[in-house]
Image (cartoon, rainbow, N blue to C red):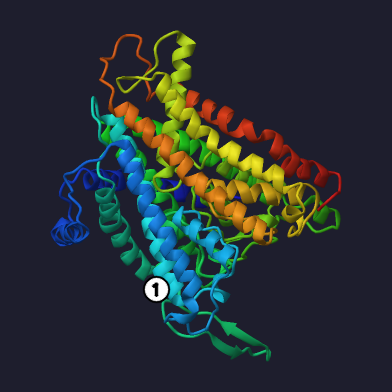
Amino acid sequence: MTAIGWLQAIVFFLIILALTKPIGSFMARVFAGESTWLSPVLRPVERLIYRLAGVREDEEMTWYAYAFAMLAFSVVSFGYLYILLRTQKWLPFNPQHFDNMTPDLAFNTAISFTTNTNWQFYSGESALSYLSQMAGLAWHNFVSAAVGIAIAVAVVRGVVRTSAKTLGNFWVDLTRCSLYILLPVSIVVGLFLVFQGIPQNFHAYQDVTSIEGFKQTITGGPMASQEIIKELGTNGGGFVNANSASPNENPTPLSNMIELLLIFALGAGLTYMYGKMVKDTRQGWAIFAAMAILFFAGFTLAYWAEAQGNPLVHAMGVTGANLEGKECRFGIPASALFATVTTDTSCGAVNSWHDSFMPLGGLVTLVNMQLGEIVFGGVGSGLYGIIVFVVLTVFIAGLMVGRTPEYLGKKIERREVQFAILAALVTPVLCLVPTAVAAIVPAGIATLNNNGPHGFSEILYAFTSTNANNGSAFGGLGPNLFYNLVTGTNMLFGRFAVAIPTLALAGALASKKAVPEGAGTFTTHSTIFVALLLGVIIIVGALTFLPADSLGPIVEHLLLLRGNTY
């Protein structure tokens, strides 16, 4: 661990801290329907979209109508992408003449991008046409991110409103997010990524001969336009199989820093937006503080583990850090930082091979996702995920002092706690049960590249990543029919089995009357509350997975110290 390495992480975090307030303020204005500096240009476009789609922007929805609209949009999105992938052979912009995807892989991929997971059981540069990449994957990167933010905004309205039955209009929130937030940033920063050297063209792949006389195929295509939204929308699906480790997708240290900032920017901004919308920015900063502590804890362990290196390599007389699976142009600090950031969120993009991390470094990536990816988190899902933990924390704190729990003037009672617990239980149940099944059935172990605890970690990582809608992979697990179907189903429930109870929680909170604060009201923006919130997150999130993690990366670490590897 070096001072320069720590400086990279500190500079990254300080930039995120500086961006949080302006981004959050802007988003609060957008979703309140207030005028912004983009309104003169985009407001007419917004009205035209509503007119063409038959949307009445002043017509609001109950929580269940909001959830139904979200589900209906997702079903249509899934069907559209599935058909596109199954017919790409006969469609234009396919200079490599790629065949149609098989039914099970198309099913898995369509669910993956619909749920903002972007799990990829294929190599994009050898399986997808340019049309599938642009009109299929990149389009889903926009709308699946917008869906997540729309849900978060609806949940915040539920916290804010009193004696109300509605949470806003899904179609309006979806449109405003895409039009005012995702598109402008993608256009401007996408052009900057082109300047950094990321391709953006429609050329067929180029066959060249190197100066050593070897033949090589150079990939091209519309990469920059997909790269920007894959990071900004915390999607993570790469144009090429190597993802952000590829020089095509991430050519320079500067592009690497920009991509890191994009992954965290909206998630951090949403915390300030939350504070603005509840009319107490201290609430947003308290959530930000809890997220920041978890981020630095994870990065510290990951950086330390990779900087220590492999003891088996040291025993051979070679000292140094663990550079296996890492790009030399990024090194240990930027690789550990990227791995931490991408699994803190639902992004899943990688600039190094997680399968090659030391066991404790791999443990960090697993735990980040097992917490529900609430450390700034996926766009929208991070905020509404941590609000679930906030409700549970307030309830537990109320039990500790013998008072009816209250949050921002609203009593937290049985119904709200039931919805919160239901949402919180989705991740452990849908990660651990499929992992146990896959570890014992022949189809589950048929495509493993490693045995022992590392092979178990590969299975656990796959179901943790797909359920958390992250999409990154250890890299040692191959596809087959079993995994295509089971991980696809896991992604589906990982998205909607959390979102729907959370919307129900928001509907329950919105219907409540406000209660004046009293002398015994528990302060929810204090240091004590942040500590309690962290405790609940660790107990409910991390400790639930401790037995499984012990069988995987923890056991592997202990065996590695004894000279065993897998």
Residue at horizontal 59 percent and vertical 52 percent from the top:
487
Instruction: Point out residue 132 in the picture as x, y percentages from the top left corner.
Output: 45, 72
Q: Is residue 284 left or right of residue 49?
A: right
The foreground one among 39 and 254 is 39
Q: Secondary structure at mark 1?
A: helix
Q: In the image, residue 375 lies at what x, y percent?
A: 48, 41
Q: Nearer the viewer, residue 556 or 446?
A: 446
Give me the residue at 34% from left, 27% from top: 508
Q: Horizontal placement of 16 versus 545: left or right?
A: left
Q: Which residue is mark 1?
A: 195
For residue 230, which quarter of the picture?
A: bottom left
Q: Residue at x 27, y 16 (%)?
A: 515
In the picture provided, is 85 more to the left or to the right than 357?
left
Dot 1 alpha-carbon crowd within 10 angstroms: few under 14, some 14 to 19, many 20 or more: few
Vertical placement of residue 164 versus 461, above or below: above
Pick the residue in front: 443 or 324. Answer: 443
Identify which amino acid the numbered label 1 is placed on.
Answer: Phe
Above or below, 282 relative to 189: above
- The image shows residue 123 at horizontal and vertical percentages of 58, 70
- Specify whether residue 527 is in view: no
User: In this rendering, does residue 545 appear at all?
Assistant: yes
Seen from the viewer's position, the closer of residues 491 and 18 is 491
In the image, residue 528 sits, relative to residue 55, either above or below, namely above
Q: Position of residue 430 (x, y in %)?
A: 59, 41
